Amino acid sequence: MITKNIIPKINMKLKILLLLVFLYTIGFAQSFKVNKIEPPNWWEGMKTDQIQLMVYGENLGEVKVKSSGLKITQVYKVENKSYLFLDIDLTGQKAGNYKLTFFDSDDNIDITYPILKRESTTDRQQGFSNKDVIYLIMPDRFANGDTANDYVVGYKDSMQDQFTQARHGGDIQGVIDHLGYLKDLGISTIWLTPLVENNTFRSYHGYSATDFYKIDPRLGNIDLYKTLVSKAHDQDLKIIMDHVSNHISIDHPWMKNLPTPDWINGTVKNHLSADHHKMVYTDPHADSSTIEHVYKGWFVDYMPDLNQANRFLGHYIIQNTIWWIETSGVDGIREDTYPYCNQEFMSRWAKAVMNEYPNFNIVGEVWTGEPAFLSGYQGGNKLRDFNTNLPAVTDFGMRDALGDFLKGNKNIDNFYNLLTKDYLYPNSDNLVTFIDNHDIGRAMFQADSNIAKFKIAFHLLLTTRGIPQILYGTEIGMIENDDHGTLRKNFPGGFPKDNRDAFTESGRTKYENDIFNFFQKMLTLRRNHPALSQGKLIHFPADDNVYVYFKIHGDELILNIINTNEHPIEIDLNNYAHIIKNRNGFTDLFSAEHFDLKDKIKVNGMKAEMFLIE
């Protein structure tokens, strides 16, 4: 009797509860949110006038979109209902704030989407060339101009001064504060490692993005970045943006909720590791699985590999690149880990950027020192049936040759031999040349503190061919070692607790001023004598450890003599009469001393000399 009375009551309560749960579920399913749209704006009058918006939200699976002012040509629904994508045709679209209405049968949300007027382009997107000298800065290690942003609530990697892989507090303001120093040094172009948000492990270097549309607040903000570019341009300095298409941080919000299953290559638990066989793209015998392993491999486990073959992600990356260029006014791009990306996509990417900004330049990081492989990445190479559309590449070949010279592994013949392979490149003048960078032991460390060798190597770098790049601190002879965190040492005087200021002559040691004065003199000569940067190179096989070459530009003729012996040598200019022809004399560009052409030139041991033939 008791059982019969209880069961009907339980059943009735259960039915009511299930009904309420059902009604709540239906109601919940019908509510949706729009949390973010990327890119956050676009501009009128762009060549790139067909854009795709990536919409972040909740329960977007049944949502429709309309606009009275923007022409929406396609709405894409994906399996993950937290995202949808909109194609918009901006042909002839005028600047203004336009309304996007997201709606379903029960609700609607209005979002304002701005189309902006473009800023004046007279001093924007200038590009860079062999007329320039690039100065590479890792902002976190260069100068702390705003201590208020050293700690930001909610951001990882607090500053630990003794830990080489932690943040040290350098920022954009620190770069702005020292533009005068850089101008005085004589460089023309500044390359900053990535500035986008890196709220992740070991974030100071900037290569682990967690937000592609936001400056890391510990470095500054987007307005400050625009100020940096503007102030640099005011001093005739250019800015190169470091961009990463290959990977993101494991802490990027995408990794908790991938827009599509194939947004990254593989999964966190099951993915290929990076394969560094970069020659496979030019290897006519390479198997497709080998090639796939290069571009689908994860660089490291905490940097998931993006799948640029995904059409939505492809649009995202191209638009993000153009958005930053247009927003900031930067003059060029250094593209990180270029070979590890989908090469077909990267070709489209480079073409899209160069189409929008014809005066621009892009240098791809290709870490191989063999010109036969390296040259295949430069756009327009007739030896390949595939055009990368990439204007410039990093010349690791020259880096290896000069590094081997500094270390004593090879003599000056090796450098001469490297340049004889320039026929492989569509444009060897558009190679970014260097001896050290943020990933390689500093030049003075490679030279084992041999200052004479160090100066010879940089003389060669600054007077042969290509676009030279100098790592911050190399101009004062920083040494350190091969460890990444250690070689990325703070610049002395850039941080509040520093006991001296190497940005000033009085704050530098005698040794540092010697190196600084050498660079300042070389950069001044390079700027004042176009033959050194833009001239045709005519060189001669290295003979008895002596390398001789001329640079010719218009009527300007400059002779360089590199003596890598420990003893002095003499050069008879009669051997070069067919180049010198009817000129009368020559001037030592370092001492300003004038000589008659009949005089033999004496060059001391382990010394580089330079003469203007008049």
Image (cartoon, grey):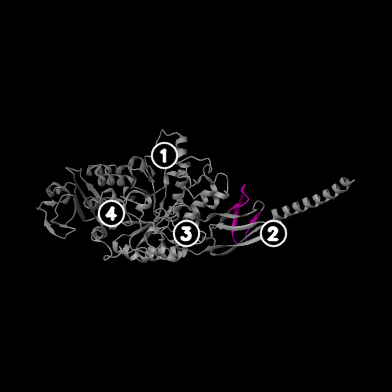
The answer to whether residue 21 shows anywhere in this view is yes
Q: Earlier in the sequence, mark 3 or mark 4?
A: 3
Task: Tell me the SS state at disc 3.
Answer: loop
**Residue underneath mark 1:** 281
**Residue 600 relative to residue 114: left or right:** left
Q: CA distance from mark 1 to mark 3?
A: 35 Å
Q: CA distance from mark 2 to mark 3?
A: 35 Å
Question: Closer to the observer: label 3 or label 4?
Answer: 3
What kind of residue is marked 4?
A: Gln
- Percent coordinates x, y for residue 196 in the rendering: 46, 57
**Residue underneath mark 4:** 534
**Residue 181 relative to residue 29: left or right:** left
The stretch in magenta equals 63-85
Asked whether 497 or 257 is in front, the reply is 497
- Percent coordinates x, y for residue 323 in the rendering: 48, 57
Vertical order, 294 against 334 (above or below): above
What kind of residue is marked 2?
A: Asp
**Residue underneath mark 3:** 216
Q: CA distance from mark 2 to mark 1?
A: 51 Å
**Residue 325 relative to residue 587: left or right:** right
Mark 1 residue crowding within 10 angstroms, few (<14) / some (14–19) / many (20+): many
**Residue underneath mark 2:** 107
Question: Closer to the observer: label 1 or label 3?
Answer: 3
Q: Earlier in the sequence, mark 2 or mark 3?
A: 2
The answer to whether residue 388 shows anywhere in this view is no
Q: CA distance from mark 3 to mark 4?
A: 38 Å
Does the CB distance between marks 2 and 1 fall below 8 Å? Answer: no
Residue drawn at x 41%, y 33% as measured from the top left: 285
Task: Tell me the SS state at disc 2.
Answer: loop
